[in-house]
Image (tube, helix red, strand yellow):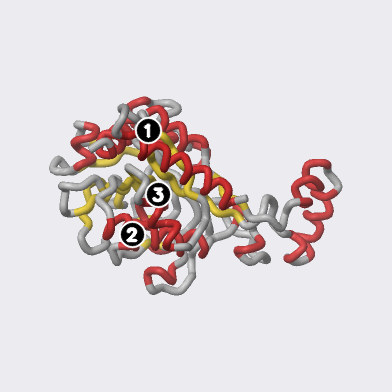
Amino acid sequence: MEFGVFGIGIVFAILYKKTKGECNMKPLIGVTSNYVYSYMPKLNEGGEEELIQMKALQDTYVGSCLYGFNDIPFNMSLSTDIQAIEKAGGIPIIIPQTEDETVLRALLNRLDGIVFAGGSDIDPIFYDEELKHNKGLFGTLHNLKAEDASVFAKTVIERDNMEFILMKMAIEETKLPILGICRGAQVMNVAFGGSIYQDLEKCYDNEKLLGHADIEKWAQYVHEIEIDKDSLIHGIFGENRIEVNSIHHQAINKLGSGLKVTAKAPDGIVEAIEIENDSRFVLGVQWHPEMLMTSDENHKKVFDALIKASKK
């Protein structure tokens, strides 16, 4: 089922490339998706508390239906990612889970740009640390392994493996414009040799730390950021300060080699990174402009810039 989605995307991309020279087609933008092990947490793999919860869910119509397909993993993309690309004038193609490098390379050869979307925590093994404080955006079901926890999984190693392969290929083998959002910015940083704070409240030493994991205000302003004047992000907004939302408990720690910090929150948390060679569109933002677009069109400028770069 997952490859079927991918196959449709490839067919469309081939048709797109064949006709691109004949008419002014919109750029094809790949966007990574979440890989979820199951619709519902596999509570039967937990302890007594989880078994009680499972029995209660199975006694409902909704729970019984979802548990019927609970051994099938699936790819999940938020509509805000797709709509942001469409509104900016691009054609979104969802990239499903695969670690086949031949498939990923073929896909990149057909894309005009790529978005690394938000999602689960990055496994610290990718930046040479032990897993100590990862808790996922929604918290942790302590008695369940990641592969049994559904959207409550702290980390999803399959998605990590794929996205680091994809990021490396996109950087080293193409000149594609790349936009990393939240987790995507963190993937970008780690791919360049950097590291991540596993949990800001436990790892970031600053008495003035803001509340960055404000999920309920996903489409509202939470704090401002200060932008460096000599940067791609400043060119996009034309302002030294803007307001952003904040839906993350991790953030960039050690900066990756070849990257530069171009925006920070008042507490010092990195909010935007770019490649030092500014002749190319490679941008990572810690906030979610695609979600803010539902309440403030100003953040559409990020996607407008991506689409413009994808047309070159």
Instruction: Left or right? Give the position of 140 relative to 90.
Output: right
Residue 241 sits above or below residue 204 on the image: above
Location of mark 2 (residue): 169
Q: Position of residue 16 (x, y in %)?
A: 39, 37
Considering depth in this image, is 31 or 174 the residue closer to the camera? 174
Q: Position of residue 67 (x, y in %)?
A: 77, 51
Location of mark 1 (residue): 90
The structure residue drawn at horizontal position 72% and vertical position 59%, both measured from the top left corner, is 42
Instruction: Left or right? Give the position of 19 relative to 258.
Output: right
The structure residue drawn at horizontal position 41% and vertical position 44%, both measured from the top left corner, is 30
Considering depth in this image, is 63 or 160 the residue closer to the camera? 160
Near mark 2 (Cα within 10 A), the count class, few <14, some 14-19 or many ≥20, is: some
Considering depth in this image, is 276 or 50 the residue closer to the camera? 276
In the rendered image, which quarter contains the C terminus? top left
Mark nearer the N terminus (3 vs 1)? 1
Q: Amino acid at mark 3?
A: Phe
The structure residue drawn at horizontal position 83% and vertical position 50%, both measured from the top left corner, is 58
Residue 310 sits above or below residue 134 on the image: above
Near mark 1 (Cα within 10 A), the count class, few <14, some 14-19 or many ≥20, is: many
Q: Amino acid at mark 1?
A: Gly
Residue 17 seen by the camera: yes
Q: Amino acid at mark 2?
A: Met
Location of mark 3 (residue): 116
